[in-house]
């Protein structure tokens, strides 16, 4: 579609004008006009993917979206992505890009799905917001706390719709469990036990030549320069490298941090958070993020969390998970809320409780807290919110807070001591050393 035309008229007017001025009859499928119940292309939300990582093609098959472009620094991924999109639409229209800025320059694109490595999230997201694109960004929100604040500011300033990839906020059993806790069915919430997948270690990896079709400088972007090795660009291995991610504490654990935050009623914390975390770090090799952890949180309302790794045996492969020390407790995978009168356990698609009668509760008007139920999945929520210009079920402020909880644990582990966080001022109390760890310099020429 010609950009100059799109600047002067919207897609619907352009299509209508084109049909009206056609010199010869043409066959237009009923699906293209919406006569068979499908949404016509002129009314669909146009979407592009920036970074063909996890679930990048979620929007391709949705009837209310028109997927128009894929962007990735690896040619093989671009070509494969284009093949998936073109195969779905039975055409060759999907554009391919190596540089995300070319995607953001297109005025016909309404929204972007961001699935780059974590160290790119802040830069791409703030740029997309400035370009007026609505954003679905995969988790975790950012690599650092300061980047998260920059993302919030950009999303608010440019008034765009944002959704975070913490899809447990669309899991109906988990939402029900959180509602039981929030509405006092287990009495006063006292303690939360969290178990999420452990990290891994690996041997040193020798540098290798950069393969054809990969723009290595662009993949690294704002991260420090490093020699190429295949594991650096593979998912999930790059989650375990400090230059690109906070490790599996955030790379996977942000899901459970987010749900525990939701069930604890801490989406809007209003007082200091004490964090005392310890971790085991690889002695050498490519990976340098913690692979095991014990994290203690104490919130201003008196609720405490104990968050441990879980030795799943397969998460994060390739690599190995050394056995934990004998005195290293591990919680079950999931989240257990313990109150003065019972407990609730949640995990994807699962809710359990004591007493069992809690499972028969019907949340209704008498309950003060009724959580958002966006059709049980993330895509319709985002699309509907874009159409109505409404807040999503996983908005940017909440994404920043849940990601920050992961960062607090990682910082405490690096320091090897307790830290105290002020969530209002977003700074550590009387702790210059910890405050310097809120941000990291970006490699030139990149910056926010």
Image (cartoon, rainbow, N blue to C red):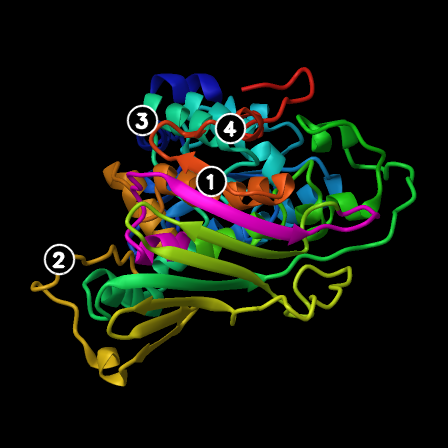
Residue 132 in the image, given as x and y percentages of width and height? 39, 25
Residue 210: which disc? none
Decide which of tag 4 and tag 3 comes sooner along the chain: 3
Q: Nearer the viewer, residue 57 or 130?
A: 130
* C-beta proximity under 8 Å, tags 4 and 3: no
Q: Nearer the viewer, mark 2 or mark 3?
A: 2
Question: Residue at 36% of width from left, 30% of height from top?
Answer: 11
| Marks 2,1: beta carbons within 8 A | no
Residue 184 in sight from this viewpoint: yes
Which is nearer the N-term, disc 2 or disc 4? 2
**Magenta span includes 419:** no
The local secondary structure at tag 3 comes to: loop
Residue 125 horizontal/vertical position (percent) = 49, 31
> Image point 77% across, 60% down: which residue?
318
Q: Residue at x 47, y 62 (%)?
A: 194
Left or right, 106 with respect to 6, comes to right
Q: Nearer the viewer, mark 3 or mark 1?
A: 1
Residue tagged 4: 431
* Nearer to us: label 2 or label 4: 4
Within-10-Å neighbours for mark 2: few <14, some 14–19, many 20+: few
Query: Between residues 383 and 365, which one lies in front from this camera angle?
Result: 365
Can residue 26 be spotted in the picture?
no
Q: Residues within 10 Å of mark 1 (few under 14, many from 20)?
A: many
Closer to the camera: disc 4 or disc 3? 4
Which residues lie in the magenta part? 258-287
Give the residue pinned by disc 1: 404
């Amino acid at each position: 579609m010609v950009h100059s035309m799109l600047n002067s008229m919207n897609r619907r007017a352009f299509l209508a004008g084109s049909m009206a001025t056609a010199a010869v009859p043409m066959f237009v499928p009923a699906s293209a006009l919406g006569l068979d119940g499908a949404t016509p292309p002129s009314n669909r939300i146009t979407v592009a993917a920036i970074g063909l990582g996890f679930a990048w093609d979620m929007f391709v098959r949705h009837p209310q979206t028109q997927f128009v472009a894929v962007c990735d620094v690896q040619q093989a991924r671009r070509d494969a992505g284009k093949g998936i999109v073109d195969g779905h639409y039975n055409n060759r229209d999907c554009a391919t890009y190596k540089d995300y800025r070319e995607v953001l320059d297109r005025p016909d694109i309404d929204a972007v799905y961001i699935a780059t490595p974590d160290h790119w999230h802040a830069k791409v997201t703030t740029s997309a917001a400035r370009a007026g694109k609505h954003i679905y960004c995969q988790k975790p929100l950012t690599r650092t706390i300061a980047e998260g604040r920059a993302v919030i500011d950009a999303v608010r300033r440019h008034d765009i719709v944002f959704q975070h990839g913490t899809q447990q906020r669309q899991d109906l059993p988990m939402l029900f469990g959180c509602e039981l806790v929030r509405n006092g069915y287990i009495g006063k919430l006292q303690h939360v036990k969290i178990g999420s997948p452990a990290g891994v270690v690996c041997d040193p990896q020798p540098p290798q030549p950069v393969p054809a079709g990969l723009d290595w400088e662009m993949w690294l972007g704002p991260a420090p320069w490093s020699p190429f090795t295949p594991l650096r660009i593979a998912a999930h291995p790059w989650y375990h490298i400090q230059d690109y991610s906070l490790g599996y504490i955030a790379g996977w654990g942000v899901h459970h941090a987010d749900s525990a935050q939701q069930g604890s009623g801490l989406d809007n914390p209003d007082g200091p958070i004490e964090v005392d975390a310890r971790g085991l770090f690889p002695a050498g090799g490519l990976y340098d993020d913690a692979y095991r952890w014990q994290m203690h949180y104490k919130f201003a309302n008196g609720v405490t969390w104990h968050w441990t790794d879980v030795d799943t045996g397969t998460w994060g492969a390739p690599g190995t998970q050394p056995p934990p020390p004998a005195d290293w407790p591990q919680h079950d995978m999931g989240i257990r809320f313990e109150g003065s009168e019972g407990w609730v356990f949640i995990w994807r698609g699962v809710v359990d409780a004591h007493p069992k009668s809690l499972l028969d509760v019907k949340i209704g008007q008498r309950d003060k807290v009724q959580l958002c139920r966006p059709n049980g999945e993330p895509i319709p929520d985002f699309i509907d919110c874009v159409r109505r210009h409404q807040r999503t079920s996983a908005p940017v402020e909440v994404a920043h807070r849940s990601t920050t909880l992961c960062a607090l644990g990682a910082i405490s582990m690096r320091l090897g001591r307790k830290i105290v966080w002020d969530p209002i001022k977003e700074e550590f109390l009387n702790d210059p050393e910890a405050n310097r760890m809120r941000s990291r310099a970006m490699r030139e020429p990149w910056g926010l």
